[in-house]
Amino acid sequence: MSVLLISGCDDGKKQSDESKVLHVGTFGVSIGFSYKQNGKDYEGYDIATVNAVAKKLGYDKVELTTADMTGLFGMLDAGKIDTIANQVEANDKRREKYLFSQTYIYSGAQLVTRNNDNSINSIENLKGKRLGVDVGSSKENFLRQNYPNAGIDIHTYDEPSAIVQDVALGRIDAYIMDRAGAQLLIDNSRLPLKISGTPVYRYQEAFPFVKNDKGEALRKRFDEALTALKADGTLSKLSEQYLKQDVSKEQ
């Protein structure tokens, strides 16, 4: 599934027909970052940021393709998309394979539980518990690699809305998600949920690119645009608009 978002050409710059389209992958179900409401186009901080970058760089439009995180990286590897705009954690393992832009989201992995459950405040409290994670996410990989014998019953989901519903209904005990969007997801769901404990680990999020000459050139241009968008306050403004907080700066 793909959607076209128009971003006017910057300063009347003329580029080839091919270069006027920026191909971007996104999850499409992340409240505040990349999501649809009432049948409208995708919106959120990730979407607004990549559109602002595209406008700075002179693209006529951004073409969005949606998939889960595993699928998105597969499309990036295959050259079907230029980058991913969806809270991509720039961790050491991913940096071995991909180039990353500068950081535009400072966040961390956060546990979310029912608001009457005080038994879970850390990973250690999850022994014998059922934990929901977004399928193919860095958090799923982190848990499987670092806590393989911790006795955590991991359940993977395609949509965050299904995870929070299951936490609220007691089908699972907790959800580990991106801290930057945790409170917003809770508020929008109107479910009896809460943030539990401090972040399991902290990280930064950025735009990934394939490690080749084309990817390096595009990463460099993204960095130039992001530097300008930070300097003029655009990223802070977009973050406050969509997330009610400024995740563009380290807290």
Image: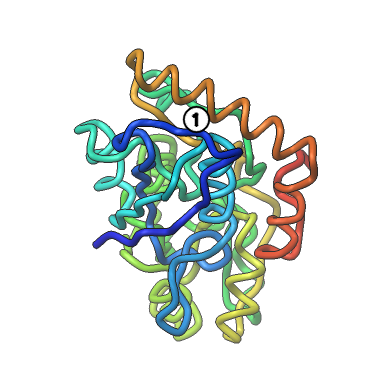
Could you tell me which quadrant the N terminus lies in? bottom left
Residue drawn where x is 35% and y is 35% of the image:
82
- For the view shown, which residue lies furthest in the top direction? 213
Q: How is the image coloured?
A: rainbow
| 89 vs 147, nearest the viewer | 89
Task: Answer with the quarter of the image where residue 74 lies.
Answer: top left
Kind of residue indicated by mark 1: Asn
Task: Answer with the quarter of the image where residue 27 lies.
Answer: bottom left
| 99 vs 132, nearest the viewer | 99
| 29 vs 225, nearest the viewer | 225
Q: Secondary structure at mark 1?
A: loop
Give the labeled residue for mark 1: 91
Q: Residue 241: in sight, yes or no?
A: yes
- For the view shown, which residue lies furthest in the left direction? 78
Residue drawn where x is 63% and y is 40% of the image:
104
Could you tell me which quadrant the C terminus lies in? top right
Q: Position of residue 7 (x, y in %)?
A: 50, 52
Q: Position of residue 49 (x, y in %)?
A: 58, 49
* Number of dots carrying numbers: 1
Location of residue 160 with respect to 86 vertically, above or below? below
Location of residue 245 with respect to 99 vertically, above or below? below
**How dense is the environment of label 1, judged by Cα within 10 Å: few (below 14), some, or many (20 and up)?**
some
Residue drawn where x is 30% and y is 54% of the image:
65
Location of residue 159 with respect to 224 vertically, above or below? below
Image-based side of 195 in relation to 60, left or right: right
Image-based side of 118 in relation to 171, left or right: right
Residue drawn where x is 43% and y is 64% of the image:
129
Q: Residue 153: in sight, yes or no?
A: no
Location of residue 90 with respect to 159 vertically, above or below? above
Image-based side of 4 in relation to 200, left or right: left
Q: Position of residue 66 (x, y in %)?
A: 31, 57
| 103 vs 37, nearest the viewer | 37
